[in-house]
Structures are given as C-alpha cells and as structure tokens.
Image (spheres, rainbow, N blue to C red):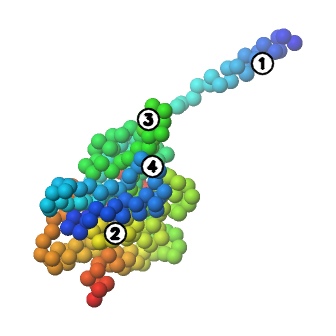
Amino acid sequence: MKTLLIPAAVAFALSACGEYPQTVHYKQGEYQGKTDARPYDGPPWNGDKAQWEKDIRARGQNQNEYKRAS
Amino acid sequence: MARMKFLCDSERCIECNGCVTACKNEHEVPWGINRRRVVTIGDGQPGEKSVSVACMHCTDAPCMAVCPVDCFYRTEEGVVLHDKDMCIGCGYCFYACPFGAPQYPQNGAFGQRGKMDKCTFCAGGPEADNSQEEFEKYGRNRLAEGKLPLCAEMCSTKALLAGDADVVADIFRQRSLTRGKGGELWGWGTAYGKGDFPKDEPGKGGK
C-alpha cells in the first residue's frame, strides 16, 4: 500500500513543476495584437467603403456653421 | 481615402471643458484618466489661449516607434489604436508622446501602472465592433456607427473639429479667411507634418 501511495503523492506534489516556454516572442517592428475590423464592415454599410466615407464627410460638414447658416 | 484628424481652433476655444466631459461620459472613462483635456496658455492674462488636447493620431506616431511589445496599429483611416491585451504598461509611449496622450490607471497598492488608455478617435479597438468587450476596454465605437468623435460633435463653439482631413481643413480655412486672423494650427505640424501618410492594412499596423 505504502509503495503505491508514495509515488502517487510525489507525482501529485510535482505536477505543477512541469517546464514549458513562458516567454512571448515578438517580431520587432510588427503589430502583434488582434486584427481589427474596419468601421464600414458592419451594417448598414456592409463593406461599402465609399458610402461610409461619403456619410462621414457629410456628417463632418455639420461642423461648418457657414454652411448650416446659409 | 478618409484620413481622420483633430483640429483645435484656439481662437474659438472658451475652455468650457465640454469636450472633456463628453469624452468621459461617452466612454465611461474611470476616475484619474483623462483622454482629453483643455490646456490654457497665459491663463488670466489678456490674449490667453485655450487648446483641447488628446491623442492626435500622428502620421508618424512616436508611441508606435517606442512600444517594446508592438501593441500599436494604425487603421486605414489613420487612427492610431492599441491592443490592451498586449500592453504591459511600461510607460514608454507616455514619454515619447509630444501631447501627453497616454494615460495609466493607478489602482494598485503601490502605485503600479495599469494598461495604457488613450483617445481612440471614438473608433474602439481590436475587439468585435460595438461589443460589450470593446466598450469595456476601449469605449464606444462611433466611427462604426457613422458618427464622428463626440468631443468634437459636442463642442459648443465648434473650436474642436474632427473628421476627414480635407473636410476639417476646409472648414478651418474658410473660418480663418472670414475672420482674417487666427490661421495658426496648434499641434498639426508635430502630429501630421512628417512624411507621407502610410498605407497600412487594417490591424496590421507596423512602424
């Protein structure tokens, strides 16, 4: 019984001592994170970049009081 | 191609801090972090000037150049963003930034720095657009909703302009010609004055 228990206890006690690589290897000069979606990928543009840009430009013109007043 | 830029007209800024409040409220930014702030030069003296300052999303961003873990990327629209999962909070970007944009939450027992937080041009981050995860880490993604940054949209005097470079530059040009003064642009030379605009793939970033 003892001969079985001792190896089992040793195996259990050392189970967290496994060696595995813990360093992250970065490629210098390149973005390493997750890929981002583009703002026009979702609805209502569904990938229509030209329309999104047109909408953003139109919204940007709301900041121009000279146009809003005339 | 849209190239997103901020432009602050110091002739119009009245130091109301509406932009600061709008940003904090929109993104639910925690205490101690100011993605945007208003700086007043010559406070109380005749001719004092105020400027609203945040990340300018530089063309040749120094923060990207110094980041040891390369967590920064530039979107197609010229917005400089970062992946908070990669950030180690080293603070190099803070020292490199000419605008003092990077902010660090300090809620540890010994004043330890958390992951860097900065203005995202209301473009979120590298999580699914308008997801809860993106909101919690980076704030709201208004560009994906077809809206411009709230700080500029909320500005009562329209001193702070945001959007496509051509559009904001045209508005400012018309304005300064009409009033006949105040054609100086604070921070534009530092942020956008160097080199050509890089044509990066979305999410690829690079230096």
Report whether mark 4 lies on the same chain as mark 3.
yes
Chain identifier of the residue bearing label 4 in the image: B
Whichever of labels 4 and 3 marks the residue nearer the N terminus, that label is: 4
Q: Which amino acid does label 3 sit on?
A: Gln
Instruction: Give the numbered dot on residue A8.
Output: 1
Q: Which amino acid does label 4 sit on?
A: Trp
Q: Which residue is drawn at 29% across and 57% down?
A: B38
State the CA–CA distance, disc 2 to disc 3: 34 Å
State the CA–CA distance, disc 1 to disc 3: 42 Å
Q: What residue type is labelled 2?
A: Cys
B159 left or right, relative to B26: left
Q: How crowded is mark 1: few (under 14 residues within 10 Å), some or many (20 or more)?
A: few
Tell me the residue that label 2 is attached to.
B155
Instruction: Give the numbered dot on residue B31.
Output: 4
Task: Choose top left, top right, bottom left or bottom right for residue B39.
Answer: bottom left
Q: Which amino acid does label 1 sit on?
A: Ala
